[in-house]
Structure formats: structure tokens, C-alpha cells
Image (cartoon, grey):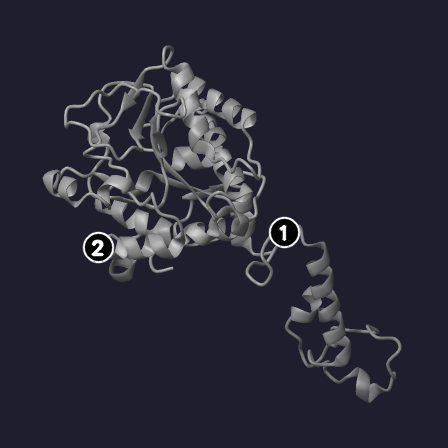
Amino acid sequence: MSSLLHQRTSSQNPFPNSFPFSPRSSSISQRPISIFSPIVLLVLLSLVVVFGVFSPWAGMPQGIFSATDPAISKWRHYTLEQALPFVAKNGTVIVCIVSQPYLPFLNNWLISITRQKHQDKVLVIAEDYASLYKVNERWPGHAVLIPPVLDAEAAHKFGSMGFFNFTARRPRHLLQILELGYSVMYNDVDMVWLGDPFPYLEGNHDVYFTDDMTTIKPLNHSHDLPPPGKKGRPYICSCMIFLRPTDGAKLVLKKWIEELQIQPWSKTKKSNDQPAFNWALMKTAKEVDLYLLPQFAFPTGGLYFKNKTWVKETKGKHVIIHNNYIIGFEKKTKRFRDYGLWLVDDHALESPLGRL
């Protein structure tokens, strides 16, 4: 094919005897071959078919990416070991896990983090090639994919097996980061930062987390792991976690992985990763230094969006708002809009990704 692209001169035919089945009259042999000739078009079409069949990028959505795209090839082999030194600041990284349907929420979350000037330490763990490419196209080096690749569409429905498989990978990703020596803050992307959470990470505890209960706690409540509820375990949210690279934090994550294996998803018990996280905390509490973050700064969605009196009483103290206690993209988006927290409508350009 490269010979087709060479500049031709009037004194030399670049295709001597290229097509022996063509008539060999002198007039034809001296005539330049058009790239629109049937033979050339047939060759080009054959090459397209060959590349399409043998493309190594078989798992990608058709019509979006090219296997030979240099940008795709570059990020395909980008590893967590390469990404962490690039994004981490002072040994700390902020991590979220995203599949393609969640990209608008990712952008909304990033705007709020940018306002707190912590965006540079964000690493997006993409669960599909579309997310990997989109983030790194706009924000090079800030997304990594950890194989295997899951079905992005199956992963977004809460309570589904796809959602369980998606969230069940979380403790493995976090453990890998700790093993590489980094502290990590994990966030779900249906969250909005109203303030800087890092000043609240007091002391040098192993694991920091938030309560998922709507019962109002006193402002000076205990930072110990809350007692078990009716189901025999606490109700801690797995949406916002900070872990230091200590043996204690690693023990919690290993126990979390173990609990997920003990209680897998089934049609009768449509579990998610949060109960397993609570069992892990409860079973390791005597060996690990745990810290419950203040409720007024990190309220669950069931409290912030449903108790106007409490919100008014604690105004100015809220740091991270979680849009949980509600299911569905449309419902979450509407609720954020109703409370002035859907930032992408008017402030998309504040995000490192810009307007998606």
C-alpha cells in the first residue's frame, strides 16, 4: 500500500507489471492508475475486511473505536502501576469506578472536586473501553482499565447481577492501590462535594467511613463503629471510604472480598457489596483502627434530601452529599437539579473533561 502513496513523476510508472492480466498496450501502461479504479478499490476493500476480522480490539463497541487508533492502543496498555505515580499527590489518590452510563455523574462529581482544588489527584477506574478512551481523550492519564471488562449496560441497574459484579470488584481495586503503597479515598460518582473532606480525616486511623442511617446523631457523636442493627450488622455506606496503606486497612479489604464470596448474588438474594463491607468491618473491628466520619459533614441521602429541618440546623457544615436512597439515573438527576446540585448544566467547562 505504501507504493500507492508515493509521489509519481511523469517519467516513471510506479506500477510496472502490477496487473499482468491487464492489456499491455503502450498507451495503457503509460496511463496513471486512478485510486478509484476497480482494482484499487477492491484491494482497499479487502484490507478493510481483513483488519475488521482480525482486529485485536474485539471487545469494543462497534463504530466508536478503531483498533489501529494510536490513542486507543496507548491507553489499552496503561496500568495502575503507571497511573498512580502520575495522579497521586503526597501519596494519596482519589478514586471512582465508572462505566459509560455514569459519565454524566462523573462529570458532575469532578466539577465539585475541582472547586475544592483536588481534581489533580483523581483517578478514574474505567470498567469499559468507552469510558477509558473518553476520559483519557479529554484528560490524559487520569483513567485506567483493570481487566476483565464487564458489560457496561448490565452494570448500571441497582440490584441486578451485573451491578453486583460491578461493585464486587471495588475492594480488589482498592486493595491493589494499598499494596502499591498509596492512601486512597473512594467515592461513588453520584456524590457532590460542598467542601474539602480532607481536614475531617483526623488522626492516623486505618479506615474512615460514613453512616448510612437516617437517624440523627448528636454533633459530637462517637467515631467508633456503630452497633449492629436488626440484621446483625452495622449500616455503614460503602460509597465514601478513606484507607491508609496499613495492615489493618488491607485486612478489612481482604475480609470484604471474602464476605462477597460467601454471600454471592442470586435471584432470591439480590445483594450488593455494602452488606459484605459491613460484615468485614464488624468482624475486624478489634484488630483495625476504624473511624466514623461526622454525620453533619457526610450525611446519607436519606437524611439530607428528606429532613429539611436537620439540613437547616446544620447549614454550612455539609461536605459531601450522597444522592442515595433513590434509584435510577433520571430520578437522581432530577433530585440533584431540584437541589441545585446538578452542576453540568451550567458549569461543565469547570470539569477537566469539559462538556461531554
- In the image, 152 versus 264, the foreground residue is 264
Q: Which mark is residue 57?
A: 1
The amino acid marked with disc number 2 is Gly
- In the image, 7 versus 156, the foreground residue is 156
- In the image, 318 versus 71, the foreground residue is 318
User: Which of the two discs, 2 and 1, labels the residue nearer the N terminus?
Assistant: 1
What residue is pinned by disc 2? Answer: 340
Q: Which mark is residue 13?
A: none
- Residue 301 position, x and y percent, is 28, 42
Residue 112 in view (yes/no):
yes
Q: Quadrant of the C terminus?
A: bottom left
The amino acid marked with disc number 1 is Trp
Label 1's element? loop
Q: Residue at x 31, y 51 (%)?
A: 108
Residue 118 in view (yes/no):
no
Q: Is residue 81 above or below residue 3?
A: above
Task: Give left or right: position of 54 versus 92.
Answer: right
Q: Could you classify mark 1 by the number of other residues whose Cα lies within 10 Å: few (under 14), some (14-19), or many (20 or more)?
A: some
Q: Residue at x 22, y 31 (%)?
A: 295
- Residue 312 position, x and y percent, is 11, 43
Query: Where is residue 141, by image quadrant?
Result: top left
As measured in the structure, the alpha-carbon distance from the residue carrying label 2 to the one carrying label 1 is 41 Å
